[in-house]
């Protein structure tokens, strides 16, 4: 039994030494790994980063495209529109226990503008034989060009 205790003590010392070396090595290896990962990430970001020359080139391309569009697009002062409408609702006479009546109105509008002046015509019809035509001459005082 006495011979086993020194062997056991020697095995414990060897085990502690191995574990101690094992714990120290990954810590230094991890620091190196982190440095490598940080360098890889910064290089990846650097490859995607815009330089001043890249930005100036992009700006010149945008300017050239804008100039081409301005040269090849023509603003028309004429505008036409066509609208349609449908309105359905229940109507009451206002008296207690009075029956509801259903109303249906249909219509359309046509408009034409030349610059700031325009004509507009509208038609409305209902099932109660109610029909109306409206017409107007319009001036646009505050014109916004798109």
Image (cartoon, rainbow, N blue to C red):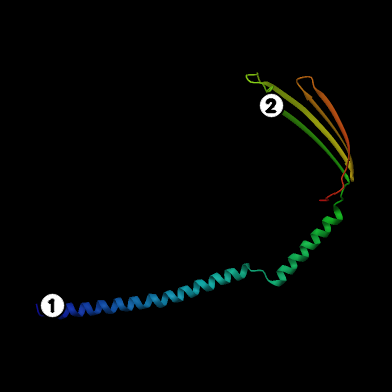
Q: Residue at x 25, y 79 (%)?
A: 14
52 lies above or below 94: below
SS type, badge 1? helix
Foreground pick, 27 / 128:
128
Q: Earlier in the sequence, mark 1 or mark 2?
A: 1
Discs 1/2, front: 2
66 lies above or below 86: below
Residue 34 lies, in percent from the top left, at 47, 73
Please tell me in which quadrant of the rendered image residue 112 appears: top right
CA–CA distance in space, label 1 to label 2:
103 Å
Quarter holding the N terminus is bottom left
86 lies above or below 59: above
Foreground pick, 95 / 10:
95
Q: Which mark is residue 4?
A: 1
47 lies above or below 112: below
Residue 36 lies, in percent from the top left, at 50, 74
Q: Residues within 10 Å of mark 2 (few under 14, many from 20)?
A: few
Q: Which mark is residue 89?
A: 2
């Amino acid at each position: 039994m006495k011979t086993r205790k020194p062997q056991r003590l020697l095995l414990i010392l060897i085990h502690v030494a191995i574990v101690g070396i094992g714990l120290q090595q990954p810590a230094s290896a991890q620091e190196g790994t982190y440095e490598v990962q940080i360098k890889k990430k910064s290089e990846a970001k650097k490859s995607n980063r815009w330089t001043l020359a890249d930005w100036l080139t992009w700006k010149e391309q945008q300017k050239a495209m804008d100039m081409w569009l301005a040269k090849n697009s023509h603003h028309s002062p004429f505008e036409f529109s066509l609208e349609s409408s449908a309105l359905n609702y229940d109507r009451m006479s206002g008296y207690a226990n009075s029956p509801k009546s259903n109303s249906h109105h249909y219509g359309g509008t046509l408009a034409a503008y030349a610059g700031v002046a325009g004509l507009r015509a509208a038609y409305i019809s209902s099932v109660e034989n109610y029909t109306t035509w409206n017409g107007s001459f319009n001036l646009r005082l505050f014109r916004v060009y798109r």
